[in-house]
Amino acid sequence: MIRTFLYLTACSLKNRVLRRFRRLREPRYLAGLVVGLAYLYFFVFRNQMRPGRRPGAGFAAIASFAPDIVAAGALALWGLAVIAWLWPFGSKTWTFTGAEVQFFFTAPVSRRALLNYKLLRPQLGMLFGVAIVSLFSGAASAGGFGRWAFVLGGWLVFATIHLHTLGANLTKSSFRAPAPKVRWLAWGSAAVMMLASGAVVGSLAAQAWPLVSRPTDALRAVLEASRSGIAAVALWPFTAVVAPILAADSAAFARAIVSALAVAVVHYGWVLASDAQLQQSAAAAEQAHVRERGGVPKLIVRAAPFTLAPAGRPETAVFWKNTIQFGRYASVAVLVRALVPIVVLAVIVGLNRKGGAVAPLVLMLAVFLTIIGPHMVRNDLRMDLPRLPVLKTWPITGRELLVGELLAPWVVLSIVVWFLLAVAFALSPAWSVGPGDWLGRSAVALAGAILAPMLIAGQLIVQNAAVVLFPGWVATGGARARGVEAMGQNLLMFAATFLALAVGVLPALAVAGTLGWLFYLFIGWPGALPAAVVFAGILVGEAMLALMWLGRVLERTEPSQVEIAE
């Protein structure tokens, strides 16, 4: 069976590569490939091969801090394991494609062999991903055994994380099953994780006294505590998995890889024996496939963020539809209960001078989400355009549809950025940069709260405009195109977004900047607030004109022009 599965994997890889080469006949993919290769050359290969550069110098510099990095990596893996156990819901443990259900389930293949195949097949993608990371980080050019230690050790880290997450999800599923199916292994694995986590937390809590000093001292104390005493024993499996990445030579790697492989093998056996329902998962998937072929698909019901009125604006209905997807992560009540205490804590910390070191970090995160957030949150026309045949049957104009589609990501991102700005404002008394009085800080914070949503809206409009104007060039739907050509297309889209945003922002920036400078000369920092209002007013006018025009273009767009990603 192993030879058959290897043959299937090789054929799938070959067909995927051939399909990528065939689509280069289309100009969009060829242009993306050229841009992607240019990016890899100028920012990766040329940097690694420039004269005077010692091979693997960056990786060697990191390797000089190997003990601290291994300790920090072990703590990070332990944190990921805790999240996997405490996360309120788990991902699907076993998923099977239609072809696998049709051919494998009717073939003379045991359920255990099929599950082994499902566990082993993702390892190729993990190994390829680690190889790409080694190329960007400089580890691929490291001298001696460093490159192989990074690639093989990194692959083993991701493989162990994958197995541990599957085991945790299977154990939690067995606890939700009827009592006879909760076996001793489920109780035992949960007890081991609880004891290890309790030992780590207790040991680190005993070292809490350095937290009153500088943050660097606290970090050093935490790392030292994790390498000694009961914490070192509890963190040994995580340390063993991380250690091979930074092995200095082949002998050190051989010693470290034995422990790491032992941890991975234990996880592999744990996953295969963790639940009585394991071998029944394939049969359950087969039954689900039969039900789907019978025309009775399984409905997915999610809680609505708010109650939709029987009558009202059509934009509100589209906004309501798109925000339902966010219900998978959090509700409004959960966000309020989680965010309000953080703001209160920030106010308390802001009264202490040590809070000044945290304020710029929070402010940088707010700026990052303002700039990058619209590219990450895609609950708009980028997700819904493949359903254009259905959208065209709705009694709604193109402009109304666009406004409704943009509202969900705009509202969510604006709320998150406002929260970060509120935290930065609460910490600002301890920060020596900017206005020193309460009135000036309040004016600057309100100006940021006005500017950020407008910049977010501008980027969302530009990206959805690209979907409407060039439906064959932009991948839509839940899937994402992959490969160097897809990376090149994303780079082109990223550059075009900021170029178009700059063209739209320049008129408003010129007027508001001049006005803000004049106000600053007369009244100081509070002059930023009226300048921000003028800036936002100009952008609102530009956005209204753009949405009216794009709405008419959307009404003329044919569904056959839409590109659907693989």
Image (tube, rainbow, N blue to C red):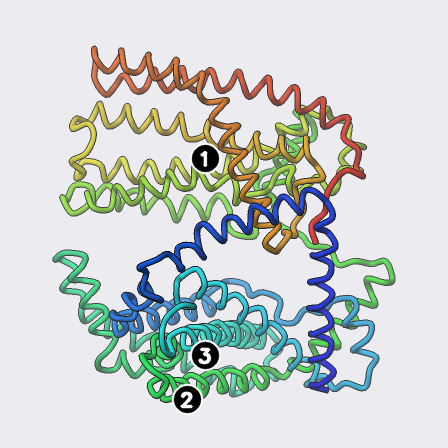
Pointer 2: what residue? 258
Q: Rounded to the nearest whole Å, what is the CA distance between mark 3 and mark 2?
A: 25 Å
Counting residues from the start of the chain, the first of labels 1 and 3 encountered is: 3
Figure quadrant of the N terminus: bottom right
Question: What percent of the width, then of the height, locates residue 230?
Answer: 25, 82
Which SS class for mark 2? helix
Residue 98 against residue 406 in the figure, above or below:
below
Residue 503 against residue 259 in the figure, above or below:
above
For badge 2, the amino acid type reads: Val
Corner quadrant of residue 308: top right
Of 20 and 202, which appears nearest the observer?
20
Counting residues from the start of the chain, the first of labels 1 and 2 encountered is: 2
Counting residues from the start of the chain, the first of labels 3 and 2 encountered is: 3
Q: Rounded to the nearest whole Å, what is the CA distance between mark 1 and mark 2?
A: 49 Å
Tell me what residue is drawn at x 61 percent, y 49 percent: 33
Q: Which mark is residue 414?
A: 1
